Structures are given as C-alpha cells and as structure tokens.
Image (cartoon, helix red, strand yellow):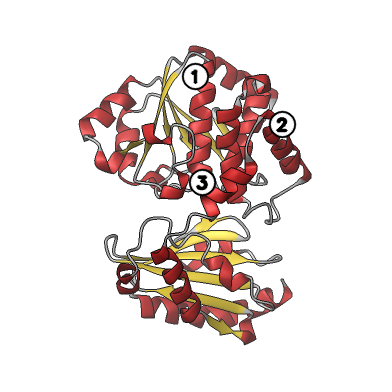
Amino acid sequence: MQENQIRQFKAALQNSKKAVIIPHKNPDGDAIGSCVGLQKYLATQNCEAVVIAPNAFPDFLNHVPESNEILIFEYEDRNKIIELVQEADLVWTLDFNDLSRCGGLAPILEKYAKKFAMIDHHTYPSNYAGELTYSDVSMSSTCQMVYHFIEMMEDLPLIDKDMASCIYTGILTDTGSFRYRSTTSTTHRIIAHLIDIGVDNSQIHAQIYDTNSYDRLRLKALAINNLVILKDFKTAYITLSQKELNIHSYKKGDTDGFVNMGLSIKGVEFAVLFTEDEKEGIIKISFRSKGHFKVNEFASAHFEGGGHQNASGGRSLLSLNETVTKFKSLLPKYQQKILES
C-alpha cells in the first residue's frame, strides 16, 4: 500500500469501535483464517468485531481458534444480521473483491453497510471500498496480506499464538502446502515468524489434511476411478454427480484437494474437477494448472469464474454431461497454450 492508504487505514482503525467481517460464500481456510485473524487483531484496537459467513465452512477448519463463534448467515435470523451490519461503523470484506461473492449477504451489505474495507488477492477488484482497498494479486493468500496489514499498522508485536494460528492456516491451505508459484521467500519468512510465535504447524497440518472420514476416503477412491486423462491436451478431469456424493454421505469440504490428484499425474498440466450441486442447480468447477497456463482466464471466459493463474473456480448451468462436453470442445483452442506451459 501507498503511504496515503496506510494513513487512511490507520485513521479508520482508530475511529472504528464496532465492525463486521465477511468472507466469501463457501469459505475456505484462507477466508476463515483471515477473518478470525483480523477479528483478533481488531480486538487489540478496542474494536468489537463479529465474523459473519454467508454459509457453513468445512469441519476441518473447526480447529481455527474461536471459529465456533462465527455466525452463519444461512442459519441466523435475518433481522439479527441486518442489525449487526447497521451497528457496524466498518464492514471488512476478506478474500473476495466483489459483493456478489458473498451470496445472500450481498443485498444486506449494499443496503445497510455504512463503510467498507477490503483485503484481498484476487484479480479485478470492485471499487466499493474506495480508499480502504488493500488489493495485491501477487500475494499467496489473504492471510499473508493480513500479516502484512498488521505489519503496516506497525503492530506485529501484537500477534499472539491464536492470531498466528489463524494466519498460518490460510497461508498453508491457499498455497497448497507451500507448493504454488505464489509462495515466495517472504511467505516462508512469515511462516518462520509464526512458528516462532508458537504456532504448532504439524498439528494444524494434521487437523486439515489427516482427519478423513471413511466416507470421504471412499469418495476419493471413486473420484480416482472417475478420472479421465486426455493425453493430447495434457489434461485430466474428474466428475462427481450428486448421486455419487449422496451415496458417500458428502459433507462440505469433502472434495477439497481432489482436483490436485489429476494435476499430480506425470505429464498432466491442466486438471479439472466437475461437481454436481443439485441444491444450487449448478455444476461447480475447480481448475488447476502447472506452469504458465492461466486457468483464471479460461474460467472467466467460459465458466463464469475466475481466481488465480494456477488455481481458479467456475460454474455451469448445464447438466454434468453437457458441461464436460462443452469443456472438451474448448480444449483444441487452448491446446498450444497448455502444451507450452
């Protein structure tokens, strides 16, 4: 951030006594970690903040300190949420940069929020937060940005073990356990500092990645069985129908990381996971790539999506089979870019 922006944020912090913090719909480790981490920091600034998530988050994030206090909009009384937003002198939006990304909360925020602040690392940010916009697409995660934000506020000594654990969780998950290109030497230095503060990195990794249920392991086996490799395009994709999810007692977060199984295959540069969601009436799509093939541009151009160069999401209103057919029909146009990545 520029010096003028830092001054604006410092002034906003000084004047804010009640705040609301919002992650995106279907919050992941980076969204939950950054929101709770910021909440804990705001507490050190004598600001009472509440985190309101648009919908539920995966069970494997229950280890995040005080995550049980997060209000879930889809389960709460609408009037209670409206009251909290009205009372807040500042609404923080983390890990997304367009209000449409927070689902049913968007109309409430648009109507009742007095002022916004944004911390996010996705491309093409909206301007709803004005001067209080901290956007950096080069960052590994919003949690890393929260760390830098606290640093720019000259408050790094205020980071305690719980705050550090929140930040560590988001960086760990959004970097794919530190393997994505956005993981820099600065990212590792931050991780070292968080561990020095007292983060139990081994325990957090185990709680996120080593708490599989029997049903999830069976679903993973099914996903591997459904995996298709298109050698001419160095591409792999997995499909999971709603029926298959139901048979294996699917819970939110159960398919996290499945798309990376395709990308782990030797010779595959582009991997996709198609998941049917009958409740929302869409096909959810996860895109991953190696090298320089920009899946965010692919997702934006064809599947109402976006994200990062090597990790993005999208959606389709077609049936599962129709979506896969559409996807395969697009590959010849991108073949050279995939092969050169």
Q: Is residue 271 left or right of residue 20?
A: right
The residue shown at (66%, 75%) is 338
Q: Report crowding for label 3: few under 14, some 14 to 19, many 20 or more residues within 10 A (C-alpha).
A: many
Tell me if I can see residue 121 in this picture: no
Residue closer to the observer: 225 or 289: 225
114 vs 219: above or below: above
Q: Earlier in the sequence, mark 1 or mark 2?
A: 1
Identify the residue position indicated by label 1 in the image: 43
x then y, percent, for residue 315: 41, 64
x then y, percent, for residue 260: 58, 66
Q: Amino acid at mark 2?
A: Asp
Q: Report crowding for label 1: few under 14, some 14 to 19, many 20 or more residues within 10 A (C-alpha).
A: few
Q: Is residue 18 left or right of residue 230?
A: left
- Mark count: 3
Which quadrant would the C terminus be assigned to in this image? bottom right
339 vs 259: above or below: below
Q: Is residue 116 left or right of residue 81?
A: right
Residue closer to the observer: 229 or 10: 229
x then y, percent, for residue 55: 34, 45
The residue shown at (32%, 20%) is 87
Q: Amino acid at mark 3?
A: Gly
Identify the residue position indicated by label 3 in the image: 29
Q: Secondary structure at mark 2?
A: helix
Q: Amino acid at mark 1?
A: Ala
In front of the other: label 1 or label 2? Answer: 2
Q: Report crowding for label 2: few under 14, some 14 to 19, many 20 or more residues within 10 A (C-alpha).
A: few
